[in-house]
Amino acid sequence: MAMNLRLRDDQTEALRRRAEQEGTSMHALVLRAVDDYLARTAHEAIVRKTAMEQAAKWHELMERLK
């Protein structure tokens, strides 16, 4: 799917410089950033869900230990 991405001028220039430094395209950097964000937030969601489940599971015991 195609989409337009509008960056501020300073973002565009920073992205252009980084792409040149890494010897890659701005497009490739943006794709990598999106992939990194999706992987990180998916992991955070799993950790948050697991923490909530464990907190509920052990709530009674933790209350008794207070």
Image (cartoon, rainbow, N blue to C red):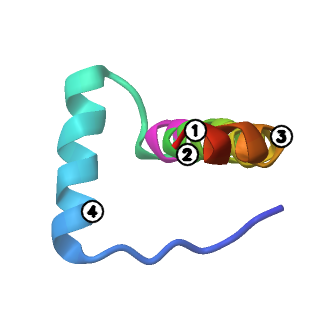
Residue highlighted by disc 2: 37
* 24 relative position to 53: left or right: left
* Mark 4 surroundings within 10 Å by alpha-carbon count, few (fewer than 14), some (14 through 19), many (20 or more): few
**What mark, if any, has residue 57 been given in the picture?**
3
* Mark 3 surroundings within 10 Å by alpha-carbon count, few (fewer than 14), some (14 through 19), many (20 or more): few
Q: Amino acid at mark 1?
A: Arg
Separation of residues labelled 1 and 4 (CA atoms): 24 Å
Q: Is residue 44 above or below residue 22?
A: below
Residue highlighted by disc 1: 40
Residue highlighted by disc 4: 12
The percent position of residue 48, horizontal first and vertical second, equals 66, 46
Which quadrant of the structure image shows residue 9? Answer: bottom left
The percent position of residue 10, horizontal first and vertical second, equals 16, 68
The residue drawn where x is 24% and y is 64% is 11
Q: Amino acid at mark 2?
A: Tyr
Q: Nearer the viewer, residue 16 or 55?
A: 55
* 26 relative position to 30: left or right: left
Q: Is residue 45 magenta?
A: no
Query: Element at badge 3?
Result: helix
Q: Are marks 2 and 4 in contact (CB under 8 Å)?
A: no
Separation of residues labelled 1 and 3 (CA atoms): 26 Å
Q: Amino acid at mark 3?
A: Lys
Separation of residues labelled 2 and 4 (CA atoms): 19 Å
The residue drawn where x is 43% and y is 37% is 25
The percent position of residue 40, horizontal first and vertical second, equals 57, 38
The magenta stretch is: 28-32
Q: Amino acid at mark 4?
A: Thr
Separation of residues labelled 2 and 3 (CA atoms): 30 Å
Which quadrant of the structure image shows residue 8? Answer: bottom left
Which label lies toward us, 2 or 4? 2
Q: Is residue 44 above or below residue 1?
A: above
